[in-house]
Image (tube, rainbow, N blue to C red):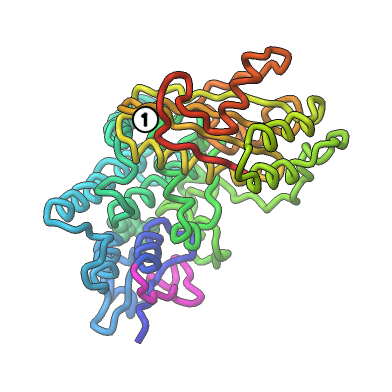
Amino acid sequence: MALVLHSGAGNKNAYKALIAAEYSGVKVELVKDFQMGVSNKTPEFLKMNPLGKIPVLETPEGGIFESNAIARYVTKLKADNPLYGSSLIEYARIEQWMDFGATEIDAGLARWLYPRLGFGIPYNASMEEFAINFFKRSLDALNTHLANNTYLVGHSVTLADIVVTCNLYMGFSRIMTKAFTSAFPHVERYFWTMVNQPNFKKVMGEVKQADAVPPVASPKKAAAPAKEAKPKEVKKETPPPAKAAAEAVEEEAPKPKAKNPLDLLPPSKMVLDDWKRLYSNTKTNFREVAIKGFWDMFDTEGYSLWFCEYKYNEENTVSYVTLNKVGGFLQRMDLVRKYAFGKMLIIGGTPPFKVKGLWIFRGQEIPQFVMDECYDMELYNWTKVDISDEVQKERVNAMIEDQEPFEGEPLLDAKCFK
Ligand SMILES: N[C@@H](CCC(=O)N[C@@H](CS)C(=O)NCC(=O)O)C(=O)O
């Protein structure tokens, strides 16, 4: 009998086991036609979880409730699962971060979000202030840890990352706007890196950050009876336990896809793909062939060149963390691949490493949708290249060809976005 997870399709607590299952090669199926308020009230369900809460995992040996316990069980079905680290101390730290997720992130978020949704404790402005400060303290600690660590424990994804990301998911998608999260840049980087991992994406789909703090639900709405019985649409976030009150935050219907504004610009004589090909195919005489070819084809009206420099270079104290950070940035720039080319240099023989880059964007400005959708952009200072200045032009050349030393220092690595 396959393992059956009893939950709606978009439940952040159910995601924990589903993502762990993807990493572990374990088959877990979501129960069919789950209806909140109906399916979780049946005698069969209550036998598996007397609390009547979801998620519940149905196994051949009976039910398991509590999402962390379910995720642990699924993880342990695979012998020596790397999701549980490779030593006792790693195991302990994985457990530590999972507890942190439950008692700091989940609890902190609940105190802030649920009163606004009219669930549980009634909304009160000074209690909210306390809740936000409590939560910020937790996020600050997480941010400090992530300044020097790509993952919570060790050098790859563990169950701690799965659980804590699922805990953060509700915050990012429901209440933590960009204005709030920008104070925690490492948490931002971590969260977006995690939710874009293929095994997370398969389960969570595309994650979007909340663009506003939900308004306080009116007492009438808050007190309204649960609409739990309404069947859920697959792949949409199931509101938190407060589904009754969560009426206040209606799900939006998908909007038709608008044409990219860059496609509306006057045509350019420069074909970016030609440049990308020339760059990739030039193996010798790079300066004479590729760099010369670049300036021959560069269209100053259709494209612009930009230098970028990481704002927090002093934090780049660990080489692989710095490399991962840049790698993640380039992954997230995928949305602009048709309209951009970039070089990112990781500079220095010893830490802290400097990260500097060169980008070509279609149009005369950095495209707004990139600024809006790729949070890394804000972590860099951007300066438009003045190509009438020979010194700046030569710097462009040096960056394109990974010149070493670069500005007097060796290169740790050079990455290309093409
Ligand atoms: N600590 C539990 C939380 C379970 C929970 O609160 N589930 C909510 C949905 S996210 C629920 O079933 N609420 C229904 C209710 O409170 O009756 C876990 O991690 O599994």
| In magenta segment, residue 330 | no
Outermost residue on the bottom side: it is 1
Within the displayed image, which quadrant is ligand 1 positioned in? bottom left
The kind of secondary structure element at disc 1 is: helix
| Label 1 packing within 10 angstroms: few (<14), some (14-19), many (20+) | some
Amino acid at the residue labelled 1: Glu
State yes or no: Cβ of the residue under disc 1 lies below 8 Å from any atom of ligand 1. Answer: no
Outermost residue on the right side: it is 266
Outermost residue on the left side: it is 88
Q: Position of residue 183 (x, y in %)?
A: 41, 26
Q: Position of residue 156 (x, y in %)?
A: 32, 52
Which residue is pictured at 38% across the width and 72% down the height? Answer: 5
Which residue is pictured at 72% across the width and 41% down the height? Answer: 275
Looking at the image, residue 68 lies above or below residue 2: above
Boundaries of the magenta span: 24-40
Q: Quadrant of residue 57?
A: bottom left
In the rendered image, which quarter contains the N terminus? bottom left
Looking at the image, residue 347 lies above or below residue 142: above
Looking at the image, residue 27 lies above or below residue 196: below
Residue, disc 1:
128
Q: What secondary structure is the magenta-colored segment mainly? A: loop
| In magenta segment, residue 25 | yes
Which residue is pictured at 34% across the width and 28% down the height? Answer: 349
Q: Quadrant of residue 351?
A: top left
Tell me, yes or no, if residue 199 can be seen here. yes
